[in-house]
Amino acid sequence: MPSKQGQQQRLYRALLGCSIGLVVLVLFSFLFGAGPVGWQQSLAGLLSSVGSKHDATHFVLFDLRWPRTALAIIVGAALAVSGAVLQAVTRNALAEPGLLGVSAGASFAVVAAIYLGASAATLNIWVAILGALVGCALVLAASHVQGVKGDPVRLILAGAAFSSLLLAITSVVLLQDQRTADEMRFWLIGALAGRPQEALVVSGLAMLLGFALILFNVRALSALALGERIARGLGHNPVVVQLISLAAVAILVGAATAAAGPIAFVGLVVPFIARALVGPDIRRVFFIALLLGPCVLLLADILSRLLVPPYELPVGVVTAFVGAPILILVVRQRRLSML
């Protein structure tokens, strides 16, 4: 059992490593892309203080790459923290917004809003939060159903069934309306490019609210992760803790989904790595996830630009390729630990 001082040192080393990694990946996000502007031109544009704002390099750096880099940072942090909180609330290492249907609820709500005529970015965000809230409520209900409670794989199967149902309904809506299909096709796969600036601002403000709720609730959430009886013994109401936590998850996932589409597996991969770095305490995992989530999504976005030049892959495809093997690894570990 590592000492408290040893745990603090692990946390500080992990925070330092993630911070350095984030700075490096932000720089790489500015330097590399699928277009004709190479990394040498990009670096010269970043270092130059006299470049014209109408220059092609300036346009690529600050009108194209800067917004998607900022979006990757806030969306990566939101999805990573959401996954860590869901895993703490359900006490299930497989819990993740994409796997449990929270992202599917947000996506369906946005598609339904577009189908009904909505187009304002702010409306889409609040509609997505409402859809994610419904998904969170279903997660909470499923986690207390006899036969599902305590079995991580059955909970994931319940979430997958809910996601599949919403995906089927979404597909029917898209087939019925070509305008909605054209507007949502690329977004539904998960992508960071081409998002309006106002979506970035409104999503960021909504995510700050979600982070504040979790930070306010993180001590109680840490107690809940040890079990409801222990949480009550420490003076916390488990139901209130779960409701506040899931409301924060709904805000984070809804805002992230509205801004970048449903990006899966970030909420699974990042808490898995964070626990390996600093242990299972949600208070430490929370701060690591805030830095590691942007690193993972930025890395996936950079790869999405470089794998098939001069085209780009949707970032959701890259995260799926990375996340699926980790999902199999986690399931295998859980099954072996139950034998």
Image: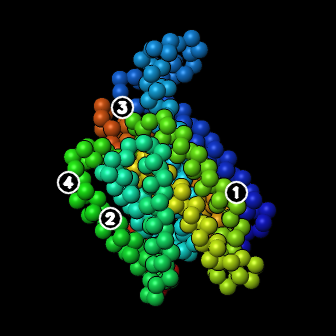
Marks 1 and 3 close (CB-CB < 8 Å): no
Q: Residues within 10 Å of mark 1 (few under 14, many from 20)?
A: many
Q: Residues within 10 Å of mark 4 (few under 14, many from 20)?
A: few
Residue 122 image point, x, y percent: 48, 45
- Residue on which the image places disc 2: 166
Q: Is residue 319 visible?
A: no
Query: How far apart, in angstroms, are the residues tagged by discs 2 and 1?
Result: 39 Å
- Residue on which the image places disc 4: 176
Residue 188 image point, x, y percent: 33, 51
Q: Amino acid at mark 1?
A: Leu
Residue 164 image point, x, y percent: 31, 67
The residue that appears at 58% across and 61% down in the rendered structure is 248
With respect to residue 318, does 34 lie above or below? above
Q: Amino acid at mark 2?
A: Leu
Query: Residue 11 has which mark?
Result: 1
Q: Quadrant of residue 100?
A: bottom left
The residue that appears at 59% across and 14% down in the rendered structure is 49
Numbered disc in front, either 4 or 2: 4
Q: Amino acid at mark 3?
A: Ala
Q: Quadrant of residue 284?
A: bottom right
Q: In the drawing, does residue 126 fall left or right of residue 15?
A: left
